[in-house]
Image (cartoon, rainbow, N blue to C red):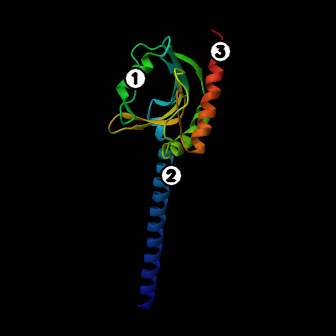
Amino acid sequence: MIFVHKKQFKYFNMKTIKLLFGISLLSMLFVNCDTLKLENANFNQKILFEAGYANYAWSPTHSGFLIDSIGNVYCYNLPSKWKDVDSLNQISEQDMDTNLGQTNGICMSINKEELKSKLILLSKAASATTTKPKNEMADAGGAYYLGYTFNTQTKTYNKILLKQTGDWVINNNSKAAEDLTIWLSAIKQQINNLPD
């Protein structure tokens, strides 16, 4: 009778161990899936970054580029019906698609692995604070460096200000935003160096 209890005890332990092992594997799988979702969250959206310059003081100037989730860089110059973010720093998916339709097409591409490495920085910049706007110039317009996160439920993009210069200067207080601004500036320089 003791032997039966030991056998049942061993069977219970093996069954418990198998059950715990299965639960552990499933937990790791879900954690890994969540990690992948977090790292690739922005790949569920079309547009990730934008940089540009606008000045309407003298003759209208509005140029820049959008970067999509597969690394295409779409350049724009004086789009006629550009949609801006609202007072909550949001823009609808439909309005962003309208903006994308007003670009001059793909002007260059970025390696997807390079782009993926920037998503971690965007996540850090999104949670940082920004400085108060400081007036530094007049009639100089403004250069802007932006990232976007996307709410799949409301189908809206949220603008993440990385840096703004010109008439009004605003900085994102994170090192991640500074790194992204340098990266976007380098892309801007590459675009400026493209043959016409």
From the viewer's side, name the closer residue of 56 and 117. 56
**CB atoms at circles 2 and 3 under 8 Å apart?**
no
Where is mark 2, residue-wise?
32
Camera-side residue of 106 and 185: 185
Q: Position of residue 116 (x, y in %)?
A: 57, 37
Does 53 sit above or below residue 195? Answer: below
Q: Is residue 124 above or below residue 75?
A: below
Q: Which mark is residue 194?
A: 3
Mark 1 and mark 3: span between their CA atoms?
25 Å
Structural distance between the alpha carbons of marks 1 and 2: 32 Å
Please name which of the two marks, 1 or 2, marks the residue nearer to the observer: 1
Give the mark nearest the N terminus, 1 or 2.
2
Q: Position of residue 132 (x, y in %)?
A: 49, 40
Residue at label 1? 97
Q: Position of residue 141 (x, y in %)?
A: 52, 22
Which residue extends farthest left? 154
Cβ atoms under marks 1 and 2 closer than 8 Å: no
Answer left or right for 185 relative to 167: right
Q: Quadrant of the C terminus?
A: top right
In depth, the one of 165 and 77 nearer the eye is: 165
> Residue flagged by tag 2: what amino acid is it?
Asn
Residue under the image location 60 percent in, 27 percent down = 110
Secondary structure state at the residue bearing disc 1: helix
For marks 2 and 3 on the same chain, the one whose residue lies earlier in the sequence: 2
* Three-letter residue code for mark 3: Leu
